[in-house]
Image (tube, coloured by chain):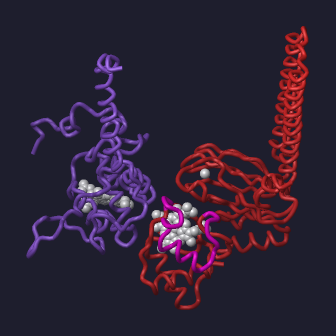
Chain colours: A red, B purple
């Protein structure tokens, strides 16, 4: 029981807490493999114990080995080997069948998300052909409960892998080649995804939050995301905006509605609406934001954002501005 | 026992040589491999000022800043390569071959090929269309760009040049075997065209 509890891990990042049709199938496969392996393990251990006990008994009673021992042993080994082959075949077949049922993308998928893996964060774009245009954000995906969502996966530097254990299996993101995957969440929740393909120094700190919420809440979110960034009304935030646009930040980040339009780093148009920063590494609080901006190499050594030397009042203004980007 | 040792004298000597070589190699490769992730910018005085002359009035101060620490470091050069695209240097210089800006893979320099001269070019800009990146790019990254720009024309050690690209290189495949002739010799114009 304790073992199972450890296997389960964190509830929002676990294969054993499936919350969607695809993950359900992966979880059943997992349980099937676990049960079969447990039975085989117990049978093997039992057989071993029985054989050892019998040998002891024979020795104690001075019994001779039966004359047809060799033949009986051959028979036993043959049976065991055939059982192994059959079990492995069954595994192979169930595995393939589950894989096949996961693959086909449902024809009706109202939402398409283009997900690009970068060292070491996720670029998220909602492909929307309507007049309102696309939505770009980073490290956080919102999806409505009960609807299949199609993902188009790509990478811009090295191979990454998308894995939300509660919702689906893994799929690699390959530079220059678009792959697709889909999943659906049946219960609302904040599911943690993790890059599952080693991609360099900060691979471990490359998480993505998939937030499944009721349709109405999702629509409200996406409508907010469509809007250009909030223009500051107070002087401190206004100064912060100036620091952002005239300094180093605008060389790498974009904020729609301003002149900052570089896509080397995450889009910050609605930064304050996100729960975490730096790909799930820190909570999105004023303190964490300050620490990150001044010395990102302390938080994620090797990350592609450089340290920023800012005068204290400039940093303060910048933080006020960033926190106003709801 | 002793006979065994005497018999394998050659073997022992070669083992010794192998060990010495590998340890020497690892010693020299350290500097090449180090990833200087957190540091105050090297070789730059505060404010990014750089001396382009060793002559100084009054007491001479250290001028070591002029030697770009990143030059012998493969990681810094590859970071410079990434930034060359991130900051859109390639938009004007193509991938070193030149476009609206001059080519950077040849050995002709309008403003000098020294690290501190290239640093000044990037930070201050140049009158005929080279923008100034002052305040837009931290000094550390400017030095990485300098190391990369110099690697384009083979001015820093071959072992640190970044991975092969599909783009123009001064000589093919920067990871290829070292050329027998130095790039300078190989591309020297005929005597009649020399100034
Ligand atoms: Cu990774």
Tell which of B156 and B1 is nearer to you.
Answer: B1
**Residue B105 can be seen, yes or no:** yes
Left or right placement of residue B192 versus residue B99 in this view: left
Left or right placement of residue B186 versus residue A287 in this view: left
Image-quadrant location for residue A55: top right
Q: Quadrant of the C terminus of chain A?
A: bottom right
Picture layout, residue B130 above or below residue A289:
above
- The image shows residue B187 at horizontal and vertical percentages of 21, 37
Picture layout, residue B30 above or below residue A276:
above
- The image shows residue B8 at horizontal and vertical percentages of 32, 19
Q: Is residue A281 magenta?
A: yes
Seen as rendered, the residue at the extreme bottom is A234
Q: Is residue A35 magenta?
A: no
Left or right placement of residue A205 versus residue A133 in this view: left
Q: Residue at x 52, y 54 (%)?
A: A201
- The image shows residue B86 at horizontal and vertical percentages of 45, 58
Tell which of B45 and B114 is nearer to you.
Answer: B45
Q: Quadrant of the N terminus of chain A?
A: bottom right
Image-quadrant location for residue B49: bottom left
Residue numbers of the magenta segment: A279-304
- The image shows residue A12 at horizontal and vertical percentages of 77, 61
Picture layout, residue A255 above or below residue B82:
below
Image-quadrant location for residue A218: bottom right
């Amino acid at each position: 029981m304790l073992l199972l509890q450890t296997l389960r891990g964190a509830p929002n990042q676990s294969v054993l807490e499936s919350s969607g049709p695809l993950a359900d199938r992966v979880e059943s496969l997992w349980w099937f493999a676990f049960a079969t392996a447990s039975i085989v393990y117990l049978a093997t251990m039992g057989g071993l114990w029985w054989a050892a006990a019998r040998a002891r008994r024979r020795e104690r009673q001075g019994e001779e080995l039966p004359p047809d021992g060799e033949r009986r042993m051959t028979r036993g080994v043959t049976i065991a080997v055939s059982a192994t082959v059959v079990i492995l075949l069954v595994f192979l077949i169930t595995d393939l069948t589950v894989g096949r049922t996961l693959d086909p993308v449902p024809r009706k998928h109202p939402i398409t998300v283009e997900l690009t893996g970068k060292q070491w964060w996720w670029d998220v774009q909602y492909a929307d052909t309507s007049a309102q245009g696309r939505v770009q954000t980073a490290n956080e995906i919102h999806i409505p409960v009960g609807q299949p969502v199609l993902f188009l996966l790509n990478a811009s530097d090295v191979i990454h892998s998308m894995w939300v254990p509660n919702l689906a299996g893994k799929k690699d993101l390959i530079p220059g080649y678009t792959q697709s995957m889909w999943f659906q969440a049946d219960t609302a929740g904040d599911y943690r995804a993790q890059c599952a393909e080693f991609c360099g120094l900060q691979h471990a700190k490359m998480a993505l939050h998939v937030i499944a919420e009721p349709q109405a809440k999702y629509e409200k979110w996406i409508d907010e995301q469509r809007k250009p960034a909030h223009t500051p009304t107070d002087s401190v935030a206004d100064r912060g905006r100036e620091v952002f646009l005239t300094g180093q930040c605008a060389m790498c980040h974009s904020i729609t509605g301003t002149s900052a339009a570089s896509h080397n780093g995450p889009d910050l148009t609605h930064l304050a609406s996100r729960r975490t920063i730096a790909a799930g590494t820190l909570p999105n609080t004023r303190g964490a934001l300050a620490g990150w901006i001044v010395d990102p190499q302390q938080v994620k050594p090797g990350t592609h954002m450089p340290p920023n030397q800012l005068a204290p009042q400039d940093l303060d203004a910048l933080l006020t501005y960033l926190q106003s980007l709801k | 026992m002793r006979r065994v040792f005497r018999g394998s004298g050659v073997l022992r000597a070669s083992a010794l040589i192998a060990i010495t070589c590998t340890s020497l190699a690892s010693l020299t490769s350290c500097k090449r491999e180090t990833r200087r992730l957190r540091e105050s910018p090297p070789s730059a005085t505060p404010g990014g000022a750089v001396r382009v002359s060793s002559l100084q009035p009054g007491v001479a101060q250290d001028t070591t800043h002029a030697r770009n620490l990143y030059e012998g470091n493969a990681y810094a050069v590859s970071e410079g390569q990434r930034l060359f695209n991130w900051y859109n240097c390639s938009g004007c210089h193509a991938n070193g071959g030149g476009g609206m800006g001059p080519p950077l893979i040849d050995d002709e320099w309008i403003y000098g090929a020294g690290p501190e001269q290239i640093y000044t070019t990037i930070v201050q800009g140049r009158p005929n269309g080279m923008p100034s990146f002052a305040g837009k790019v931290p000094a550390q990254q400017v030095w990485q760009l300098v190391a990369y720009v110099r690697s384009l024309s083979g001015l820093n050690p071959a072992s640190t040049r970044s991975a092969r690209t599909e783009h123009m290189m001064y000589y093919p495949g920067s990871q290829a075997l070292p050329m027998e002739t130095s790039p300078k010799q190989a591309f020297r114009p005929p005597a009649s065209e020399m100034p």
